[in-house]
Amino acid sequence: MNVDEIIGSIVAKKLSNKKYGRYDVMKDFGLTEWIARKHLNSANLIITNDLKKKVANGLIELTPEMEAEIAQKETEIETLQSDINKQFEGAKIVTDTALTKGNTDLDMQVNARLLALHDSILDLPFGAEEENLPKPVIIGCKRPLFLSDIHFPYHDFKALQLAIEYGIKNHTDCIYLNGDIIDAYQQSRFNKDADSRNFQTELNMVRTFFSMLRKVFPDIPIYYKLGNHELRHELYISQNRGVLGIEEFQLEYLLHLRQYNITLVEGRQWARFGDLFVFHGHEGGSFLKGGVNAAQNTAKLLQKNAVIGHIHKTQSYLFHTPFGTCAQVNYTGCLSNINPRYVGLGNYNLGFAFAVIDENGKSNVSNIVIENNNGTYSLRIAV
Ligand SMILES: [Fe+2]
């Protein structure tokens, strides 16, 4: 089967439900109108032949309506085919003339080149499907609580407790675990201490955390977004071909997400609550910016309201234009040790975020800092 025949048969299958037309073919296969028509033509031919075969084999009996449909399709096909042949024939003559050296008719050249492109574009293979970004997750909840960078087993117990208490007191209707929930220390490509906690310990802690969350919030949606630390596991699996593709080795399975009715959000996927975009922060190097002015830089580039984790620092920036407020970007603090061994004394801070989404989808984010002064914890709403 050549590419034309393959697409023709796919289109034929879709066409048989009678809800598929030229524009769907163009959209689905990324084709020009001209090529889409060519495929519809061959698809119609496949359908007609299929119908004829069924009749010949005694599988179906032709009703007058079916006969009329076949006749109509055959006329359509004939007309389209002769139309296509004429145009391609014309195109070849035009192409040959137009692209002859010395021809100065620019319009003619453009038309000839376009026709030549239409005629030969299918010789190019389609782009790899896996390169497409997964669709964003649109969540209808109105009072999401965002917890990120817990980094089990390096979590800050008290900070985590305070963040969840805040969610309870503010009637949260959704918990969004915004990445780096597990540290996956042993799967890091960086040097490791032999005495540090193993992956099983980390998994057990996360499962205990889920069990606690489900006791407190038995029936609200909970999402688990894969951050860069979770991707350590994916990378590890991808480098060990023996376990590739085995469900039991996937993080979703190891973390018992289905058991706790927790929805996975993939590493390259993002979520949206109304007008609020949610990223872990590792997804797009070109517009999610770290550094001292992370929120400011991101707001200018992204120009959307956002909640982002990843940098372990609370930052909010309101981006104004002369015509009004354009966007508010909120980087949230972490819920893990703020002076990890690999950083030493850093400027990380504890924190989380909570949002209220109104009936028009407009978000209002509280970006909350948790202060720890010698073991005395308190909350401060940064924005
Ligand atoms: Fe993190």
Image: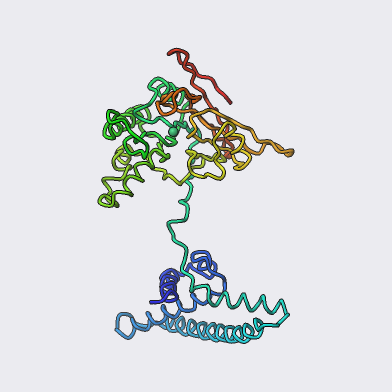
Q: Position of residue 32 (x, y in %)?
A: 56, 70
- The residue lying at 69 percent from left, 36 percent from top is 320
> Quick check: 185 above or below 270?
above
> Quick check: 112 above or below 137?
below
Between 364 and 332, the residue placed more toward the observer is 332
Q: Position of residue 100 (x, y in %)?
A: 65, 84
Residue 232 relative to residue 345: left or right: left
The number of numbered discs placed on residues in the rendered structure image is 0
Which corner quadrant of the figure contains ligand 1? top left
- The residue lying at 56 percent from left, 29 percent from top is 315
The quarter in which the N terminus is drawn is bottom left
Residue 271 relative to residue 51: left or right: right
Q: Position of residue 70 (x, y in %)?
A: 45, 83
Between 248 and 139, the residue placed more toward the observer is 248
Between 215 and 92, the residue placed more toward the observer is 92
The quarter in which the C terminus is drawn is top right
Between 67 and 324, the residue placed more toward the observer is 324
- The residue lying at 71 percent from left, 37 percent from top is 324
- The residue lying at 47 percent from left, 38 percent from top is 280
Colour scheme of the picture: rainbow
Q: Position of residue 63 (x, y in %)?
A: 39, 82
Q: Residue 201's image quarter?
A: top left
